[in-house]
Each structure stands twice: as C-alpha cells, then as structure tokens.
Amino acid sequence: MKNLPIEFSERMKALLGNEYDDYIKALNAPPVRAFRVNTEKISSEDFEKINSFPSQKIPYVDNGYYFEFDKIGNHPYHHAGMIYVQEPAAMAPAECIDINPDWKVLDMCAAPGGKSTQLKNKLSKKGILVSNEIIPSRCKILTGNIERLGLHNCVTTCMDTARLAKTFPKTFDLIMCDAPCSGEGMFRKDDVAIDEWSNENVYKCAERQAEILDNAVLLLKNGGYIIYATCTFSLEENEMTVDNFLKKHPDFELIPVNEKIIYTTVDGIKFDGCECENISFSRRFYPHKNKGEGQFMAVLHSKLDPTAEYGYSNNNKTKIDKTVKEFLDDALNEYDEEKVLMYNGNPAYFTPDFKIPKGAAFSCGVTIGEIRKNYIQPHHQFFMAMGKNFKRKINLSHDSYEIKKYLHGEEFDTECENGWAVVTVENCTVGGVKVVNGRAKNHYPKGLRTK
C-alpha cells in the first residue's frame, strides 16, 4: 500500500467522496504502459502489420497503444524512432482540440518530449514546433528524443518563460502549457513525488503556474489557443488557476474539448467562489476511471480577432560552404537548398521563413553535421531525419544478426556501395554508417548503443 500524506488523503476524500476507495485501489495497482506510433516515420496502419508487441489501441489517440513488453527501449523499433513510450493519460491534452497542420506550435515546459512529439505528428511540412525546457540537462534529453524520432522543423530552446516571451512575442497559434506541478497524479509511478508532497508545495506550484500562463499570453497570436495541463489533482493548481487566469485575462474563454476526451474524463470541479460558469469544460483524468495516471486539462481560447501574420525571414541565412553542398549532393537523392542554413556554426536543415534569433535555440532544425577540414562529419540527427532521401540504404530485419551488431556499435559486412549510408529497419532509419569496401563503419552514437 502507498503511504500517502494525511493531508493529501483528506484532500482526495473531499474531491472524490464515495469514489475514494476505488482511487486507492487503482493507486496500488500496476501502472499502465503505452506508446505512440511516430507517424513521421511510419503510418499506424503499416506499423500494425509489423507490430511485435502485445498491444491494444487507445480509444482517444489514433496512433496510441497500451502494451505489455519488457525492455521495449532496446527494441530496434524504438531505436528507429518508430515509437515513443508515453504514459497514456499524458497523451490526452494534445487530443483536446483539432490542430491545423500548418500552425506554429509551442510547448512551453516540454521535457522529456512526449507532448511535443505528439503535437509534431499533427503538423505538416509547413508546421513548426518550438519545444522549450528551462533545465539544460532535461533540454538535452528533449532534443535527443526529437532527434531519435527524426522530426523536421523543430526547434528546442532552454530558457525561462519570461525570456521566451520576449524572444517570440505573439508568434504561436497553439501553446501547450504542461506546467510543473505537485505531481499528485504520478503517485502510482513515483514514490519520490509522494515524499516531496506538501500543501506548501501545492501553493508554490500554483503561483508558478499563474506566472507561466501570463507569459503564454504574450507568446500567443490573437485568436490562438492555450492547452493548460497538469498531472495533479489539487483545485489550487487546476480549476482555481484557470478561474484566476480568466479573471485576469477577460479576452480569453474556456472552451469544450473534443468529444473523445470528454468520454475519457470527468468534468472540472465547481468550487466555492468560482466565477467561471463553464468550469466543467476543463477535464480530469483519474486512474480509477480509465487506464492511466492523473491528468488535468483545459483549453483557453483568445477571443481577440486574429491579426495578419508577420512576414518572417530567417536572419541566419548565410552563404553555405561548398563542402556542405557537395556532401548533400552525394548523400541525398533530393533536398531543398533553401532550407540549408548555418546556425551556431553548423549547417542545419530548417524552414527559411521562421525567425530564430542568434543564440536563442539549443537546437535548430535538423543538424546536418560538423564542418571539418574539407569534409562533413554527419550528425546522427541527419541520418534519422533525412533517411528516406538517402541514396544508399542498408535495410535489415529487426531480428537480424547485423542489426544487433549495429546497435552494439560494431561493424558488419554489406554489399552497399561506398559512401555514407543509412541503416534501416522496416524502411525506418536507425542510424548511419560509412561504407568502405564492403564494410559498414559504425556511426551509431556511443550513448545510444545497447550493452
């Protein structure tokens, strides 16, 4: 049995009433595991044809699956970025509204990247995702997950939300604000969250969440949407925060979520003193009601008339070293030269019509590689994102001897012609090699290799 703080138990009894015992029973059951198919790599339909994991579809996420499988992170499908393991309730916020595929989207508190990568799968080639994480070590993990999934037109930033608002004012059509919280919804999975819980921490989190939402307003275009989410149950961090936000920002309204999320969740709670008449439009996901942990979500819509879009031009567009062009011409069947730019001293592949101030990004677009003396040392992200366009491909089965050697960091024999090539599993890129006279020289990053 979980050893819950007395004050927390009293709070939950007040919220749940006669459902409290069901909640406690769920809290002491095993957590539910799930993954999403990365549809930029493979469609859900094609994945189902090769799916080797015992799994069941999540009803509110088209590309989501509950699963039971040990060490899924070591499977070649995971290394190839076909799937992203994510707690199922955490998938719900990104499904709250229909997303225009050409939108500019911001994830304000993004690490490790579950909601960011889910949002990016809903965007087209014109859509842009900026994922921000204030803690550098977590921003590195976030960037690594975006790299593994081979996503295009993504930017990661590492700054507080006040600086973020000054960097990208009135820029985004949609903002995901998955705010840091007291973590009550994660108690089943995380005993540390239980140990760190206190009423004081709940109040501190609510103050920080209000500040983050105020900065979100500065980042949002008129007429845009904010999805506010937490993984906690407290009124202070959820409905009270939403109600206070609407009092402070009368140009916003709380709107209903998509029906598939309504069926999966319960209404937001009307508390004493609540001035938002439709606070029930906010949603609560409980572990005793559905498969997953705790989650709160609310969609805040700007009622202001949308303004004309500013014409962005990328101020990082500079003359590209001919070595870069020669490398790309040799490696790829095709690419858009207008998307090749320099950022922080390295060539990158990114849309030319979105302004990234110099030094603002932790990572900008797809890092092509590092310019060395008369040659390019390609980056792992280049293989993962551009693999479909490579001229030279080595396709291996997920249970082959060669793929095991490759993921372990070893060389293997190949009939592929000399030059840079991608290694693929079920036509999805796992990484890159340099083929020299029938030997595939391994370039899989050491930190990602299997033991």
Image (tube, grey):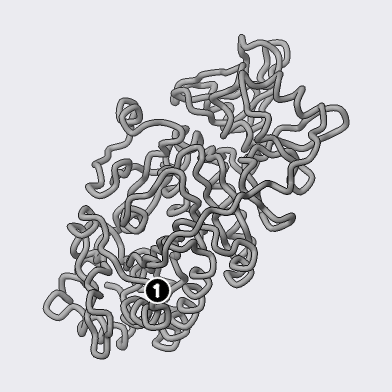
Q: Picture coordinates of residue 437 (x, y %)?
A: 72, 11
Lateral position of residue 356 relative to residue 294, left or right: right
Position of residue 402 relative to residue 82, above or below, is: above
* Frontmost residue, 168 versus 229: 168
In the depicted view, which residue is nearer to us: 198 or 223?
223
Residue 3 visible: no
| Residue depicted at 18% across the width and 63% down the height | 289
- Name the side, left or right, on which 322 lies relative to 151: right
Report x, y in % for residue 328.
70, 25
Looking at the rendered structure, the kind of residue marked 1 is Asp
Residue 395's place in the image compared with 250, above or below, is above
**Residue 254 relative to residue 318: left or right:** left
Instruction: Classify 83 as above or below 227.
Output: above
Q: Residue furthest left?
A: 18
As helix, strand or loop, the secondary structure at mark 1 comes to loop
Task: Indicate the position of residue 345 as horizontal and vertical percent values.
Answer: 79, 45
Label 1, residues with CA under 10 Å away: few <14, some 14-19, many ≥20: some
- Find residue 107 and report its horizontal and vertical position in percent: 49, 58
How many numbered marks does the figure carry?
1
- Relative to 303, residue 382 above or below: above
Question: Relative to 130, is 187 on the left or the right?
Answer: left
Is residue 91 visible in this depiction of the protein? yes
Residue marked by disc 1? 251
What residue appears at the point 44 percent right and 23 percent down from the top-left corner?
426
